[in-house]
Image (cartoon, rainbow, N blue to C red):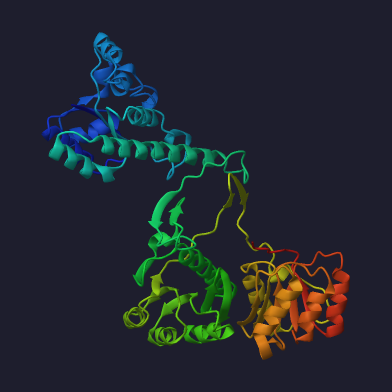
Amino acid sequence: MRALLSVFDKTGLVELAAGLRSLGWDLVASGHTSDALADGGVVHVQVAAVTGFPEMLGGRVKTLHPRIHGGILADRSVPEHLADLDAQGIEPIDLVVCNLYPFRSSPSIETIDIGGPALVRAAAKNHAHVAVVTSPDDYGPVLGELRADGVLSDATRRRLARSAFAHTAAYDAAIVSWLDADDPLPPTLHLTLERAEICRYGENPHQRGARYRSGASWWDAAVQHGGTALSYLNVFDADAAWRLAHEVAADAGGDPVVVIVKHANPCGAATADDLLTAYVRALDGDPVSAFGGIVALSGEVGDEVAEAIAQGPQADVVVARGYTPGALERLVARRKATRILSAPVPEEAGRQVRTLGAAALVQDADTFAATPKGWQVATAREPTEEEWADLVLAWRLCARTMSNAIVLVAGGQAVGVGAGQQSRVVAAELAAEKAGERVAGAAAASDGFFPFPDGLEALARRGVGAVVQPGGSVRDGEVVAAADAAGVAMVLTGERHFRH
């Protein structure tokens, strides 16, 4: 039996090669792989000795030769193939161990591998007779099976071939993405997603679901300390809550923040001088909707906060930067069904892809181009300092709420959320109804402009003091006039934040 080894990542290489040699395998190695085997005292021959040609073009050409690829691609069940090998004096190759240049971590022309993908694809194509190993994680299982059975099973070779084609597909996709770096909407998209976690179930229990990743994700470093396995919606909503908590904390200059999300929409949010107060105020925004929701806390959870969460409505997920030992013990013991997560800062959101059957919609992430410094006060009355702070929070929350959306904030606390309504007037009335008496003097945000004055008037009748909205309606003048008539301060951002 004969193996070809050509790897950039030398992890476990010598141990694998020594194991193969102990089983009687002959080894062929290229370039620096040969150097590593020589340093490890593993007997082998160099590729150049097989091909009769030295490495060329600074290493760009090493294994691209009929004596290598003929030995890999020959179908051992076809007599003509075996005759060709015999006529050319080519020995078959039964195992290819190859991983590629590190293009994804060090993208450049010189890290675009040519010979490596050719070896991998050739071996994977001929997996009926040849095994291909692209990951050091497979070295142990492959050696174990060879020691136990003498050969690799059909199922193992097929599994390894599948991994090999996935490996080269992801590699090529990374190169295309690199070449597309300056094109936000390139003519083709090549998405490579690696399954990171199988969810308890999908959006509903009869649906299957899993979390995949295209790169490093905050989820990879998150730790679940208690509770049952995460479902699809647990992951979806927890991601929304955790990202929003960090966005609000950044707006608030790092002050403690708590966000409570239910069905992808914030139902509670608050900033405060301490995390306990922030939690109490966030929960007070809508304690009924908080049941079964996601609680995201921007700081470390201590004993007092843990006790408040344990006594509060049952949460599906609690996610925080960390927990004191006592707090974690209390939460795990008192909320056995709640998933307790500690997590790092979320990565920046990237391109968004939403499938529509066989089609897909692609867009940039919704970031905030406009800031309060660029907002325009459209009314005679300007917001007070307190209203400005509440408008900023309301605007952030509204942008992360399903459209049509109206969000009311008072004193750094969300007091009313009208989400996912077809009518902006209904969204305003719903938010005001949830706020109750707290609507008086509150700041309101609308994710889209008011097409008519009626939405603004619905808020003004309930006592809202200040409103932030994008503007841009042909009736902006009428809306501003209605705000002036009601004594409401209105700010225009010039930027819409719909969310569907």
Quarter of the image where the C terminus is located? bottom right
Q: Residue furthest top?
A: 87
Q: Is residue 79 above or below residue 301?
A: above
Q: Position of residue 114 (x, y in %)?
A: 41, 29
Vertical placement of residue 416 versus 11, above or below: below
Quarter the N terminus occupies: top left
In terms of image quadrants, where is residue 151?
Answer: top left
User: Compared with residue 401, is residue 412 higher up or lower down, i.e. above or below?
Assistant: below
Left or right placement of residue 127 versus residue 363 in this view = left
The quadrant holding residue 478 is: bottom right
Q: Position of residue 354 (x, y in %)?
A: 58, 52
Q: Is residue 2 visible?
A: yes
Taking 340 as reference, is 265 left or right? right
Q: Position of residue 46 (x, y in %)?
A: 23, 24
- Asked if 442 appears above or below 211 in the picture, the reply is below
Q: Residue at x 49, y 40 (%)?
A: 173
Please tell me which residue is depicted at 44% across the width and 61% down the height of the picture.
218
Residue at (32% x, 27% y) in the render:
126
Does any portion of residue 382 appear in the rendered image? no
Relative horizontal placement of residue 268, taking residue 428 as reference (left or right) = left
